[in-house]
Amino acid sequence: MTWGGSSFSIDLQASVGGRRVAETRVQRTGLSVAAPSRAVFDDGITGDYFQPTSSAEGVRPGIIVFDGTDPGEPTGVLVSATLAAFGFPTLDLSTYGSAGQLDPVRSLPAERFLSAVSWLRAQPGVDDQRIFTFGASRGAQLALWAASAYPGTVYGAIAPGGTTGLICPSPVPSPAVTVGGAWVPCTTGTHDPAPAAVLDVQRIPGPVVLGCAGRDEELGNGCAWLAAAARKRPLREGDAYLIAPGATHLFYLPPYTPLLLPAGSAAQPTERAREALWADVMAALTAPSSVPGH
């Protein structure tokens, strides 16, 4: 992530009939200033921690972002920096270990995730009763699995652009997640969003934010997976299920950036979907808890 990292100013002028009638300077604060990061190599986890610089009083929900789940789409840093710029302490977790590590099966040991949760909960300013998971595309299933598997530890989940069931990595079937070295059951292929394949999302105590794109070039039946989860978990207070008919796969990136927008007629619907999704994300993160003890 380099776009938006640095602060800069823009001079604006308005002219009427060749005569300048107004001018102003707009200062844009870069993400590296609003959300400075530091590398984390503790407790068997690797990643980057983005700590807000805003002076909001009290503790704020903490977020674990599953990064590195989509080869070639390093979006986790941008998402994490944006969340921290809005005031939420965020750990951008290297899901499958250190960068460059040989890991052909791409499976997540649950112990790595639980270590990440423990680390995040111990950071100053983090509300240890309201930990959210955030995963998009292939990381969406991990965000939902973690929140549904550990409802006493994870409060809510943000999981746009992916399946709502745990999918075995391919082409050679291998575990998506292991617990104590044992496979967690997963589904082979994304073609059948049957009720049995959908995760136990009804177990998640806090808000769930899902989204799908009607013109998704990576997951053509993403809206069918969302609908299957909605049948298992009808909308509760704080939930948001966004359906964006004209948007493409990367609709889950933060809005108001020129990054990775599709060409042609899909660009505007994708940007509108980004705006709507991130409004839902902010609503979920800022809503007071309706769950006793959280």
Image: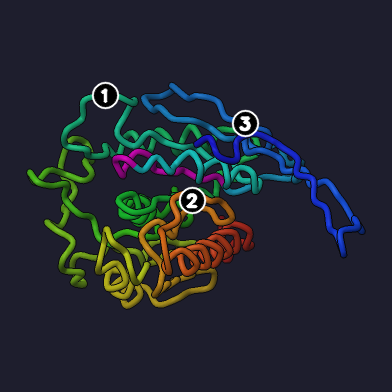
Depth check, mark 2 against mark 1: the one in front is: 1
SS at circle 3: loop
> In the image, what residue occupies the spot 54% across and 67% down?
276
Q: Name the residue under label 1.
A: 101
Report the Cα–Cα distance between label 3 and label 1.
25 Å
Q: Give the range drawn in magenta.
A: 62-72
Say what amino acid the circle numbered 2 marks: Phe
Q: Where is residue 66 in the image (x, y as percent from the top left)?
A: 39, 43
Q: First in sequence: mark 2 or mark 1? A: 1
SS at circle 2: strand
Q: In this view, does 74 lie above or below 217?
A: above
Q: Position of residue 146 (x, y in %)?
A: 35, 50
Say what amino acid the circle numbered 1 marks: Gln
Pick out the residue farthest to the top: 41
Report the Cα–Cα distance between label 2 and label 1.
26 Å
CA neighbours of label 1 inside 10 A, class few (<14), some (14 to 19), many (20+): few
Q: Name the residue under label 2.
A: 132
Q: Count all numbered tags in the image, as a single digit.
A: 3
Report the Cα–Cα distance between label 3 and label 2.
20 Å
Say what amino acid the circle numbered 3 marks: Pro
Is any atom of residue 207 visible in this view? Answer: no
* Magenta stretch holds residue 230: no
Q: Name the residue under label 3.
A: 36
SS at circle 1: loop
> In the image, what residue occupies the spot 44% across and 30% down?
47
